[in-house]
Amino acid sequence: MADTWDPAKDEKEGNACRAYGAAGIMRVPGRVHVTWQDENTLKIETDAGTQTRLLHFGDAQPPPGEQGWQGKVAAAFTNSAGVNGDKLNALTSIAALAAQHGMHWVNLGLMPGWLYSSTGSPDDLNRLGGFLGAMAQSPSDLGADVAPSEADLRTAEHLGRRVAQTTSQLARGRAATQADLAVA
């Protein structure tokens, strides 16, 4: 599917700002229902266009000693009630797992915002200062309709666009390499 994505076409058709992935779904007003489909699959259902996302864990991993996910693209975002809340530990664990499986890790690619600058604002992208992935903060007494903040959601969307662009670049590079090999 990623091989068919054309960001230039989206831009031309006015779809450049459409939402990508889970962060995009979470921005749309509506209800979210999160359940375990089975012991290894988290199911996220929304009434925003009746979308369902399945996140596979555990047995979905390649067997030990194999890099069955090698060459695939990975990134992560995390959310907690505290401003710090061990978000870096969560991102580090996910990045290490991706590396163990030979995946291409996509970092956030933004300089830190609000918490790292005297001129910063809580509305800044990357307001919590993550590099490894997107970080969000949602007070535990607020519902999903008001938290995480718009800045955190925009930061997650930024990461989603980077993942999509990186995946597209890798796919085009693979296709060009295969074409070059076929000619040779």
Image (spheres, helix red, strand yellow):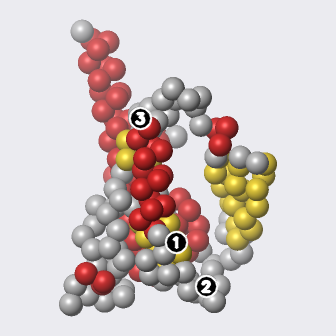
Location of mark 3 (residue): 102
Q: Dot 2: within a 10 Å radius of its alpha carbon, few (fewer than 14), some, or many (20 or more) residues? A: few
> Residue 99's quadrant in the figure?
top left
Seen in the picture, residue 30 relative to 71 is either above or below; the reply is below
Point out the tag, 3 or 2, that comes first from the N-terminus.
3
Residue visible at 51% across and 26% down in the picture: 65
Given the current orientation, which residue lies at the most extreme top position? 184
Amino acid at pointer 3: Gly
Relative to residue 67, is residue 118 drawn left or right?
A: left
Point out the tag, 1 or 3, that comes first from the N-terminus.
1
> Residue 59's quadrant in the figure?
top right
Image position, residue 16 (x, y; %): 39, 63
Closest to the observer: 99 or 169? 99
Q: Name the secondary structure under disc 2.
A: loop
Relative to residue 112, is residue 105 drawn left or right?
A: right
Q: Dot 3: within a 10 Å radius of its alpha carbon, few (fewer than 14), some, or many (20 or more) residues? A: some
Amino acid at pointer 1: Asn
Residue visible at 25% across and 81% down in the picture: 116
Location of mark 2 (residue): 140
Point out the tag, 1 or 2, that comes first from the N-terminus.
1
Closest to the observer: 48 or 135? 135
Closest to the observer: 83 or 124? 83
Residue visible at 34% across and 38% down in the picture: 170
**Residue 164 in view, yes or no:** no
Task: Tell me the CA gap for discs 1 and 2.
Answer: 11 Å
Image position, residue 86 (x, y; %): 47, 70
Task: Tell me the CA gap for discs 1 and 3.
Answer: 25 Å
Quadrant of the image containing the C terminus: top left
Amino acid at pointer 2: Ser
Q: Which mark, residue 79?
A: 1
Image position, residue 78 (x, y; %): 50, 66
